[in-house]
Amino acid sequence: VSKFEGVTMAPPDPILGVSEAFKASTNQSKLNLGVGAYRTEELQPYVLDVVKKAENLMIERGENKEYLPIEGLAAFNKVTAELLFGADNPVIKQQKVATVQGLSGTGSLRLAAALIERYFPGAKVLISSPTWGNHKNIFNDSRVPWSEYRYYDPKTVGLDFEGMISDIKAAPEGSFVLLHGCAHNPTGIDPTPDQWEKIADVIQEKNHIPFFDVAYQGFASGSLDTDAASVRLFAARDLELLVAQSYSKNLGLYAERIGAINVVCTSSDTATRVKSQLKRIARPMYSNPPVHGARIVANVVGDPTLFGEWKAEMEMMAGRIKNVRQKLYDNLTAKDKSGKDWSFILKQIGMFSFTGLNKAQTENMTNKWHVYMTKDGRISLAGLSLAKCEYLSDAIIDSYH
Ligand code: PMP
């Protein structure tokens, strides 16, 4: 009898499990709208040209495979913080940011969670309802208590701003407030600039600590600066804050696991100490991070020509998603005879659209139409082509009614 007899079967992951089910399907019309990964109009994975060029540079230079320091590649840490805050930002100039390379967005969030667990015992993290499913896993595994604030209003398929503000106000002083920097996952609904100011007001009033998850910088609007505006607005208020970054989507480096955790402190001295503790947390977890993706980012952002080409490719990707979003809306509006207002789809931003389909309706999408998606009604528009929009709108209309 096995020593592991007591180990029960774990449930499939709600997002990555969808890809597994999709792979197993033999239907010709099948569509994978589960995982948030960019696809071309031909629905093929896409490696950015600038990434290939950056990789060629690495080969030409004959770079070695020695270990990185615990905190990661220095050139990467420098450019990643500058990309986020802007190179001229006082927090950068005054060296108030502790930046440590992480294992993409997830690993960076995990480092921050461990820091919270160690230095803020009992402090709660407030997360939006709903949020990216892995947030709860990350805080649970780090033994950091969390609770939810209202975010999504099913009546309007929009933001429940009043609910959000009152829940942030009601939380114990000094809580961490997890915010999606742009392109909220799963809803695609972001606060307006004016609403961001009001969110910052309550956070400041309550002595909370803002904790940004930035997984889509540049990918939402097509502009790196526009998508970082929320984070910069908080930094401009001289608040201490945490920001996790990911290059999975905006540079298409999903499997390279490249990202960072940034902690903005009130002084460079504090930042140095915070960084030393982040390193201490990383060392027994994975020792030091992988170099390949870090070099790609450093080469792309550090070279003016490649940087320009990256921006153009990012605009192209964001543009394709916007076109698909528009076409889906057009098809739904033309074909749905019920008079339902589909304009919420156009108001959403980023890779995802929250359709408002409930669990039973999403099951109809998958079982009858072979459209693979998460049960919360989210679809990844990055996995949709213009050619498939009509098929998808038929599936959505059939499932709704
Ligand atoms: N945060 C959010 C909100 C995300 O959507 C994602 C990717 N799905 C991540 C973090 C992290 O992704 P990764 O670990 O690949 O960077």
Image (cartoon, helix red, strand yellow):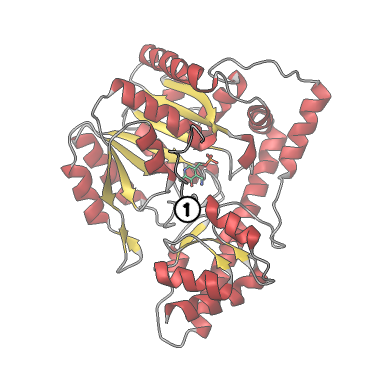
Q: Give whichever of 303, 7 is nearer the camera.
A: 7
Residue 143 shows in the view: yes
Q: Residue at x 42, y 82 (%)?
A: 401
Q: Quadrant of residue 123?
A: top left
Q: Determine which residue is flagged by label 1.
A: 14
Residue that lies at the very extreme toward the front in this rendered image:
1
Labels in figure, total: 1
Q: Is residue 110 left or right of residue 205?
A: right
Residue 90 shows in the view: no
**Residue neighbourhood size for the residue with mark 1, other residues' Cα within 10 Å, grouped as few (<14), some (14–19), many (≥20):** some
Q: Give whichever of 163, 232 is nearer the camera.
A: 163
Q: Secondary structure at mark 1?
A: loop
- Name which residue type carries label 1: Pro
Q: Position of residue 103 (x, y in %)?
A: 54, 31
Q: Is residue 298 left or right of residue 179?
A: right
Q: Position of residue 346 (x, y in %)?
A: 47, 66
Q: Give whichever of 56, 39 is nearer the camera.
A: 39
Q: Residue at x 61, y 60 (%)?
A: 22
Q: Residue at x 55, y 30 (%)?
A: 80
Residue 321, above or below 397 = above
Q: Is residue 67 left or right of residue 132?
A: right
Q: Position of residue 393 (x, y in %)?
A: 54, 76
Q: Quadrant of residue 189?
A: bottom left
Q: Residue at x 47, y 69 (%)?
A: 363
